Amino acid sequence: MKLKFIFCIWVLLLLIVCTDQSSSPEKPSIELVGTSKTQMKQGMNFEDSIFITLSFKDGDGDLGWGSNDNRTDIFVKDKRTGLITDEFKIPDIPNSNGQEISGNLLLRLYTTCCLFPNNIPPCSTPTQFQEDTIRYIFYIKDRKGNESNKVETGDIILYCK
């Protein structure tokens, strides 16, 4: 009986020692640190822009495809349409050997068009609509395809004139 008890304790200790003790999740996470401004002029090209700062963490350090790969891993949605409007690559990150990594990302988003009701063409300048409001939603994916949480900017005013 005593031998069985010692054997059970030994097996239990072996299971505890062999279990991964890592508390860092494999799924990446992001936070919105800030935006450079809250207003832009509408446009179809590079007339105006805004800088967005995001912080990131990834428990197993597998973010970024490297500069020799053209896959993107930062995604930006226009909340008005629900469509992805921009994609970015995470810059090369030194090999983390499976350890947690964290840092900040600075993204430059160029302006977009005001959207109007009643089939008024986007990027036009109707007198009855002086401005539009946009919010951007961001998320990232690691090399395993794990998607982070989504973060959203506050209101950004687009001047339609």
Image (cartoon, rainbow, N blue to C red):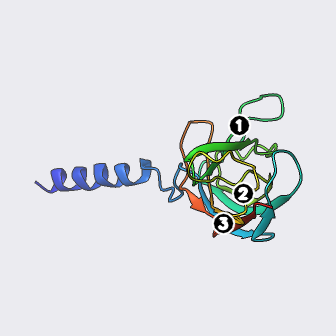
Task: Return the disc, 3 or 1, that comes first in the chain's sequence.
Answer: 3
Q: Nearer the viewer, residue 7 or 26?
A: 26
Mark 1 belongs to which amino acid?
Thr
Name the residue carrying label 3. Answer: 32
Mark 2 belongs to which amino acid?
Pro
The vertical placement of 152 against 139, above or below, is below
User: Which residue shows up at 59% across the image and 43% down it?
Assistant: 83
Q: CA distance from mark 3 to mark 1?
A: 19 Å
User: Which residue shows up at 89% across the image and 53% down it?
Assistant: 47
Residue closest to the far front: 127
Q: CA distance from mark 3 to mark 2?
A: 33 Å
Quarter of the figure with residue 127: bottom right
- Check residue 72 in the rendering and tell me which mark sits there, or answer none: 1
Mark 3 belongs to which amino acid?
Leu
Please state the horizontal and vertical placement of residue 74, each as a whole percent of the image: 68, 46
Please state the horizontal and vertical placement of residue 35, each as a whole percent of the image: 75, 68
Task: Return the disc, 1 or 2, that comes first in the chain's sequence.
Answer: 1
**Foreground: disc 3 or disc 2:** 2
Badge 3 local density, few (<14 within 10 Å), some, or many (20+)? some
User: Which residue shows up at 80% across the image and 64% down it?
Assistant: 40
Q: Nearer the viewer, residue 138 or 47?
A: 47
Q: Nearer the viewer, residue 124 or 40?
A: 124
Q: Secondary structure at mark 1?
A: loop
- Check residue 143 in the rendering and tell me which mark sits there, or answer none: none
The vertical placement of 109 against 155, above or below, is above
The vertical placement of 143 against 5, above or below, is above
Q: Work out whether residue 49 can be spotted.
A: yes
Badge 2 local density, few (<14 within 10 Å), some, or many (20+)? some
Is 101 left or right of 119, judged from the image as shown? right
Name the residue carrying label 2. Answer: 126
Is 46 left or right of 95, judged from the image as shown? right
